[in-house]
Amino acid sequence: MPSEPPPSSSPATRLPRKFGSYLLFDRIGAGGMAEIFLARAKTELGGQRLVVVKQILPSLAAHPQFAEMLIHEAKLAARLDHANVAQVYDLGRSDESLFIAMEYVEGFDLNDLLRRCTKEKVPVPIELALCILCDTLRGLDYAHRRTAEDGTPLGIVHRDVSPSNVLVSFDGQVKLCDFGIAHANDLVGEATSQTAEALKGKAGYMSPEHARGEAVDARADVFAVGILLWELLAGKRMYRLVDGGPPLLELAQRADVKPPPERGLENEAALHAIVMKALAPNRDARYPSAQAMLRDIEQYLADARVVVSPIRLGDWLVASLGSEIVLQRRRRQRAAEALALGPPVTLTPMPFQPLGAITDPTPTPVMVRKRVEPVTPAANVGPTESATPTVTSDQTLPAPTLARGLRSRALVFGALGVLVLLLGCFYALRGP
């Protein structure tokens, strides 16, 4: 998950609020392309699930070429169904806003994870770092080899394998998200200052051919994974900006990479060789596929007799960083759900009266306070509309009444019953 952004007080981001068929209740990130919200969605059968809604910034959503490419790439990403790829659920427009709804992974993105590790001075164990990268490569390999129904390769390239797009859950699952979104972003270039800043931030994980604006293939993603591995081994950024030095994009174009510093790891030379092969400036000298790089890392782990698993990764996350962020988010979710349900129903009961005391034929009213939901189509919910219904109505319901002669009828039927009983006893005593 992205790091917690400062809260926004603008009407468009007031929470909780409805957005199409979703209830947005937590703003969990923002970037050069979108605002990111945690939301609750209802299924057709009435079930509920948490999703992440990425609301594309209006300046980009209004760009025809960007919107067309984003829709195309999102449709391709929706075809991906793999344990290490975050699932895309929905793509559409609501209130003239373009959005993508995707799987929610409860945990951290790799960027946030490393930031928290630095703050807490807790290094990521190398075997767990390699576990994260192996799962990332598995997701990439699946996407790179994905074909259409007729066997034609889809040619999917992520183009933005960076720490913010590698998600690690508290149960040790690793998922790669945002396939193809960078491709749409490339089309608008310097359209806005926000996209320009986003491009500069992503330049630190670009392959040299991508930074030069050339066509890219799966080997560009392999280069990006090589940067992730270099930084996890070194504990710092691979490209460092210095005052008066070249900008980050130029450093990416040069790809002048030195081996990571030594840490005294088991068979460290073999591990460094994997890093440098993935970071070869000439794409023909790199690993030809994510699968080839994955094989070498798995072989290194086998030779070093290191056993890694999602269970160990999840246990380390909880033990080292805790899950307070999850508890806070769940509290906010419960609060949002309570607000969405509206004010509680208040009933005023009718005072108890014995049957014999009912002598007035006029019905006694029972006052029932009922919450009435506003009938408003979800698509027409405005940005300032509250998610809490406030419309109520008083409805008067007649209480049941009894006829005045009910007691007399009961006495008559009672007397007849006693007479029948006495006659039965009389004939029994007389005998045959």
Image (cartoon, helix red, strand yellow):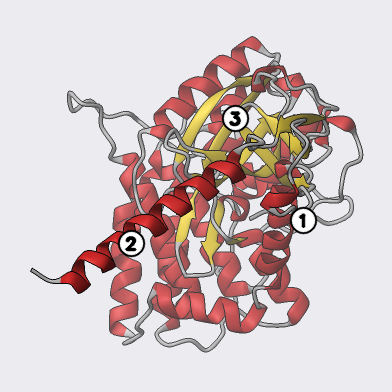
Kindly report the distance in space between the C-alpha atoms of the residues bearing marks 3 and 1. Answer: 24 Å
Above-or-below relation of 17 to 348: above
Quarter where residue 284 is shown? top left
Q: Earlier in the sequence, mark 2 or mark 3?
A: 3
- Residue 29 seen from this side: no
Question: What's under tag 2, amino acid-wise?
Answer: Leu
Front: mark 2 or 3: 2
Q: Secondary structure at mark 3?
A: loop
Residue density around tag 2, few if under 14, some if 14–19, many if 20 or more, within 10 Å: few
- Residue 299 seen from this side: yes
Front: mark 2 or 1: 2
Q: Quadrant of the C terminus?
A: bottom left
Q: Describe residue 296's horizontal placement relative to residue 186 as left or right.
A: left
Q: Secondary structure at mark 1?
A: loop
Q: Which mark is residue 21?
A: 3
Q: What residue sits right under mark 1 in the picture?
A: 4
Instruction: Compare residues 173 and 292 and report the one nearer the observer.
Output: 173
Task: Give me the residue at 57% from left, 50% from top.
Answer: 165
Instruction: Compare residues 261 and 363 and report the one nearer the observer.
Output: 363
Cβ atoms at labels 3 and 1 below 8 Å apart: no
Instruction: Compare residues 318 and 42 and report the one nearer the observer.
Output: 42
Q: Position of residue 35 (x, y in %)?
A: 73, 37
Task: Give me the residue at 53% from left, 37% from top.
Answer: 209
Q: Position of residue 81 (x, y in %)?
A: 34, 43
Q: What residue sits right under mark 2 in the picture?
A: 421
Task: Give me the residue at 88% from left, 42% from top.
Answer: 8
Q: Residue furthest top?
A: 64
Q: Residue furthest right?
A: 9
Question: What's under tag 1, amino acid-wise?
Answer: Glu
Q: Quadrant of the N terminus?
A: bottom right
Residue density around tag 3, few if under 14, some if 14–19, many if 20 or more, within 10 Å: some
Q: Which mark is residue 71?
A: none
